[in-house]
Image: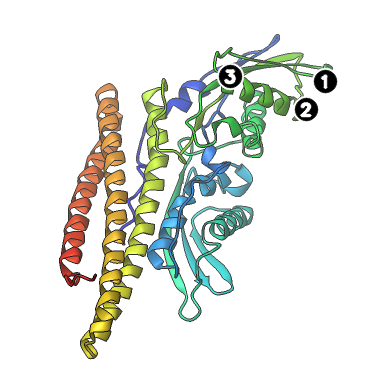
Amino acid sequence: MKVYPVLVSVLVAMAVNCASQSSATKTSEEKQQIVNITYFDLANCNPPAHEVSSPLTREALIGLLVAARPEVLECLADPKNRGKAKNIKFSVDTTATESGWEHQITHTDLTPEGEQCVKRTLDKLLDGWAKSVERPKGTPVIAHVEFEHVGGVTPTVTLGVNEASDLAGKIRLAEKDWCDCFEPWKGKVPQQLQSKITLTQGKPDPEITFTPSNAPEAQTVQNCLRQKIAGLHLTTASNQITLPYPFILVNSAVSEELADAPAELKFTQLEGVRSQVAADTAIKLGARGIAFNTYDSAVKQYKAKPQYSLVRSLKEKCAALVKADEEWVKALEREAEVEQKTADLTTTLKAQDPQWTEADTAAHKAAQTAKTDVDVATKAKTADAQSCPKERFN
């Protein structure tokens, strides 16, 4: 089973870096560069739904682990969960048994807190996605998936740089707990929000303003975030500090592109969607495997003792296999569509900055592979349909 890799080789900063180069103004002091501006994926608030067939298969478990990418990477936004390495590669080997999930994490620089965060996150997501799925009663199901946290590209907060960055970091780390604010964008692509926060020494309440928006949903989100920021009780050691803070948001739980967003941020959105459609493909392949094995067993039973009474069951099971094939092909077609959109976007970005060349090459290779996979699955569906019994029943 092939899990399509994430394009983590991008060498340029995404749109978030445009915001991170903004600076906080301090009264009677020099400006401070803010480094803790990084995107937040609303899939952390409302994970996408993934329907899993029983019994649980290795392919489906791989798919669910891939689908957990936004939440797993959010664990590593917090510096207490990371070591000193800028980039952290780690793998997860998950064993599913009748009693639950066991996760073995192999890593280069996760802290014990980071390991526990990943394990808790996976337990919660897997329990939700597979709550009605039959667990293995005998041989356990084991799946292996690799992740990579790229400092400054995937969500990253670093404390201790300067006062302005630390203030921004506190806000960013709190965003995962502000899901009620983002509820208006559940199942939708979000808008980008720009706030300005002014803290004055000795004044308990900060001044918080947002760039006005005509969209009612954005206004609702802004009003909620204003209260959340005030609730952090931020303080300053300076006489006064003004912090520009953009809420840079994506939502990999929906397949739409970000409207009116910089191309680099559109790439981030597509990158998240790629993980979800690849996850769905793996899950659909697992369902296809179940249907294939069921039909194959029925065929073997019929061949061992041919009986006309078994033909109807054969036909029904073969029809179920063809239906599973169709769902698998549809998932691959969605994946191919997203891969092509990503390739088209990286070509545009490469034209603007040659540092996107490596990512563009990888994106086009992935798009071509996805098209080939669609062709292979379509041929398998045709062959399965041709193998179905042709008897007609009144």
What residue is rendered at 59% in x and 36% in y? 158
Which three-letter amino acid code belongs to the residue tagged 1?
Answer: Pro
What residue is rendered at 56% in x and 62% in y? 131
For mark 1, what is the residue? 204
Q: Nearer the viewer, mark 1 or mark 3?
A: 3
Q: Secondary structure at mark 3?
A: helix
Q: Gap between marks 2 and 3, in whole Å?
A: 27 Å
What residue is rendered at 41% in x and 60% in y? 62
For mark 2, what is the residue? 233
- Return the x and y of residue 198 as percentages of the image width and height: 70, 15
Note whether 92 is above or below 37 in the view shown: below
For mark 3, what is the residue? 216
Which three-letter amino acid code belongs to the residue tagged 2?
Answer: His
First in residue order: circle 2 vs circle 3: 3
Q: Secondary structure at mark 1?
A: loop
Between residue 151 and residue 96, name the one nearer to us: 96
Would you say 384 lies left or right of 91 here?
A: left
Q: Are marks 2 and 3 in contact (CB under 8 Å)?
A: no
Residue density around tag 2, few if under 14, some if 14–19, many if 20 or more, within 10 Å: few
Between residue 12 and residue 54, name the one nearer to us: 54
Among the 4 quarters of the image, the one containing residue 319? bottom left
Q: Are marks 1 and 2 in contact (CB under 8 Å)?
A: yes
Which three-letter amino acid code belongs to the residue tagged 3?
Answer: Pro
